[in-house]
Structures are given as C-alpha cells and as structure tokens.
C-alpha cells in the first residue's frame, strides 16, 4: 500500500500551496468540497507522485469517520502525514454570532480535525502508518482581537488538542501546529480589499505580509525527518507580528 | 423594509430606527457594527457589501437603497 499525505482544504489558499509543494516529495490526497477547484490543483501538482482527491464537507461531522474509513479502504492507501488546512473564519462581534456559525466554525476548524486524527491514528484503519500531523492554527490562537471571538477560540481549541495528541500518540506520531499571520488568500481577500485597513495592518508586520508558500515551507519542515525531535509545538510564522510590542 | 428596520435596530442596539437617521449618529456605530451589517446583508438579502459602501450610505434609508440596488 502506498503512503500518502492528506491535505484538507487543498482547493484554496494555504492548503493549495501546501499540497502543490508537498507533491514534489510525497503522494498527496487533496481534500475539499469543490471538485472542480480540487481538480485544478491536481493539474498543478507534481507528476512525480500520485495524487488522489477526497471530497467531503467538514461541517457535516456525523458521518465523517465512516466516510474517511471508506475512502482509505476503497483506495487502499495508508496516510503517513496529515495537514489540516481547512478552515472557516467569520469575523463578527459576538452579538451578531449565531449558534449555526459557532457550530460550523468549530466543526470545520476543530471537530473534523479530531475525528480525522482519530481514524488516521487507528491501527485498524490506517495500519499504524501515521507519522506526523500539522494543524494549521492561527496567530490569534494565543492572543485576542475584536470580532475574532469564535474563530480564535476554535484555533485555541485546536492547539490544546494538538498538545494532548502529541503526548498521547508519541513516540509513533509527531503532532505540531503552525500559527500563520496574515497571508493573502480567499479568506483574507475582503480584509485586504480595504486599502486603509491593509495599510494599517501592514505597519504591524515587521516583515510585511506573508504568502501561502511561507506556510507551506513550515509544513514541509515539520513533516520531514529534520523535525524528528519536535512535537507538541506551535510554530508561529507571522513575519514577527505577534512579538512586536512597539508602542 | 419593515423587517430591515427591525434587523438594523437590533444591530445598532436600539429599539427603533427611522429612515432619516444618520448611521454615524448611533452610539453603537463602529467597525464591528459594519461587519455585522455586511453579514446581515449577505445572509438575508444575498448581497455583498463593503465597509466603504456602507459608510457612504449615510442614513438608514441610504443603506436600504444600497442593498436594493445590489439586489437588482
Ligand atoms: N489566510 C490567512 O491570513 C490565515 C491566517 C491564519 C490562519 N489561517 C488558516 O489557514 C487555513 C487556510 O486558510 P486560507 O487562508 O487558505 O483560506 P481559504 O483560501 O478560504 O481556504 C479554505 C479551505 O478550507 C476548505 N473548507 C472550508 N470549509 C470547508 C468545509 N466545510 N468542508 C471542507 N473544506 C472546507 C476550503 O475548501 P472548499 O473548496 O470546499 O471551499 C478551502 O480549501 C485555515 O485554517 C485558516 O484558518 C489563514
């Protein structure tokens, strides 16, 4: 059975860049909801390695375990690396949040990652093949900002889960997360569309804004043997944004 | 329009709003309220607004015409 890296949210932004970059070194499974977008990414991925597509809506978590188990069996694959890039961010003050939005955000950002990790770390379904996990969190995880209430707490939960899994799954599986700062993608398009906000934010990034490839480089490192003694860590990749306390 | 007036009053944290009221005159008028209006317009009327357009609408009635014009 061939060993793959699963990238959720591979149809756009950071996940797309991660998948394309990993495809140079590993067979990859591209996950997302939109088949057309996934096939476009598949066409850009390296021809050196195999590439599969897994279509699944991560808001619908009831059947998620079952669907992933079925996918593994049907395609006869083992997953050695798992990168959770899928994410949902709705910036709203708490007074405008709804239960639905809270549940959709947590299902996409946290609950699905828990259930996928559960299936992939099971001997029965993945033959003990899993070696490394990278969750894409956010630099908001350890901080706070207006309108980030639900999103920030979902990333905080993801990082707390990461640390416990690093301990629970050691020494076979290393588990880490990456905390990106602002990167140009579909998710942040609306924020960057406002020139005034863009300029204001830019002033707070010592190295300027990031690109999806900056995050993909971090993922490559954490998945590789070069990171063999690193587990349970949050790797902040944010151009210095969260260490800058210049007044 | 009646529904809209109720929705916008809730976002602005007041009991009632009038069409002629200026957006900037409300105590709750800030960047967070603008985010809420963007989400409300998208969810209830299927239109995509940005902060500059909302600020440019000036009044409650202006905001309603903005949404109506986008619906067309
Ligand atoms: N961009 C930034 O500045 C930034 C900063 C910090 C952290 N992050 C994190 O980085 C990750 C990637 O963000 P991005 O900026 O690349 O966002 P993006 O361009 O909006 O991509 C989001 C990805 O998640 C997938 N997704 C969303 N909801 C899903 C669902 N219900 N089921 C399955 N897939 C779903 C989307 O797939 P579909 O094709 O199905 O829509 C898409 O591939 C997220 O976890 C985000 O929180 C981003």
Image: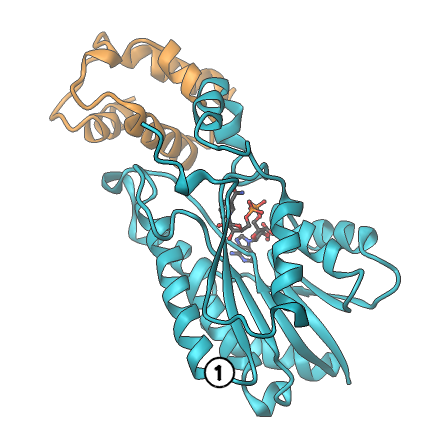
Chain colours: A cyan, B orange
Left or right, residue A63 beside residue A219: left
Relative height, residue A70 to residue A123 (above, below): above
x and y, in percent, of residue A207 in the image: 55, 34
x and y, in percent, of residue A9 in the image: 60, 56
Asked whether A66 or A49 is in front, the reply is A49
x and y, in percent, of residue A54 in the image: 67, 66
What residue is shown with label 1?
A169
Is residue A63 visible to us here?
A: no
Is residue A84 visible to us here?
A: yes
Dot 1: within a 10 Å radius of its alpha carbon, few (fewer than 14), some, or many (20 or more) residues?
Answer: some
x and y, in percent, of residue A98 in the image: 30, 48
Instruction: Tell me the SS state at disc 1.
Output: loop
Figure label count? 1
Residue at the right extreme? A47
Residue depicted at x 48% and y 67%: A112
Residue at the left extreme? B15
Left or right, residue A53 beside residue A158: right
Relative height, residue B36 to residue A16 (above, below): above
In terms of image quadrants, where is residue A210? Answer: top right
């Amino acid at each position: 059975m061939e060993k793959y890296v699963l990238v959720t949210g591979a149809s756009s932004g950071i996940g797309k860049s991660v998948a394309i970059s990993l495809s140079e070194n590993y067979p990859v499974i591209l996950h997302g909801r939109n088949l057309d977008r996934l096939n476009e990414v598949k066409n850009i991925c390296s021809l050196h390695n195999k590439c599969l597509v897994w279509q699944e809506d991560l808001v619908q978590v009831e059947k998620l375990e079952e669907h992933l188990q079925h996918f593994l069996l049907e395609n006869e694959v083992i997953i050695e690396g798992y990168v959770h890039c899928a994410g949902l961010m709705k910036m709203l003050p708490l007074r405008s949040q709804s239960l639905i939005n809270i549940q959709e955000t947590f299902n996409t950002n946290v609950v699905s990652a828990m259930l996928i990790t559960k299936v992939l770390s099971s001997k029965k379904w993945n033959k003990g093949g899993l070696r490394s996990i990278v969750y894409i969190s956010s630099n908001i995880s350890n901080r706070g900002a207006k309108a980030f209430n639900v999103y920030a707490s979902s990333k905080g939960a993801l990082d707390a889960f990461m640390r416990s899994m690093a301990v629970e799954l050691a020494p076979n599986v290393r588990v880490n997360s990456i905390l990106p700062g602002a990167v140009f993608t579909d998710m942040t398009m609306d924020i960057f569309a406002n020139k005034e906000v863009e300029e204001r934010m830019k002033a707070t990034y010592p190295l300027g804004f990031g690109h999806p490839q900056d995050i993909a480089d971090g993922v490559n490192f954490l998945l590789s043997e070069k990171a063999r003694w690193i587990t349970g860590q949050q790797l902040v990749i944010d151009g210095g944004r969260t260490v800058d306390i210049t007044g | 329009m009646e529904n809209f007036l109720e929705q916008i009053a809730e976002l602005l944290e007041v009991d009632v709003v009038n069409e002629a009221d200026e957006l900037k005159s409300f105590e709750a008028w800030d960047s967070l309220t603008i985010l809420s209006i963007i989400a409300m317009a998208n969810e209830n009327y299927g239109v995509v607004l940005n902060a500059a357009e909302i600020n440019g609408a000036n009044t409650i009635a202006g905001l309603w015409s903005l949404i109506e014009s986008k619906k067309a």
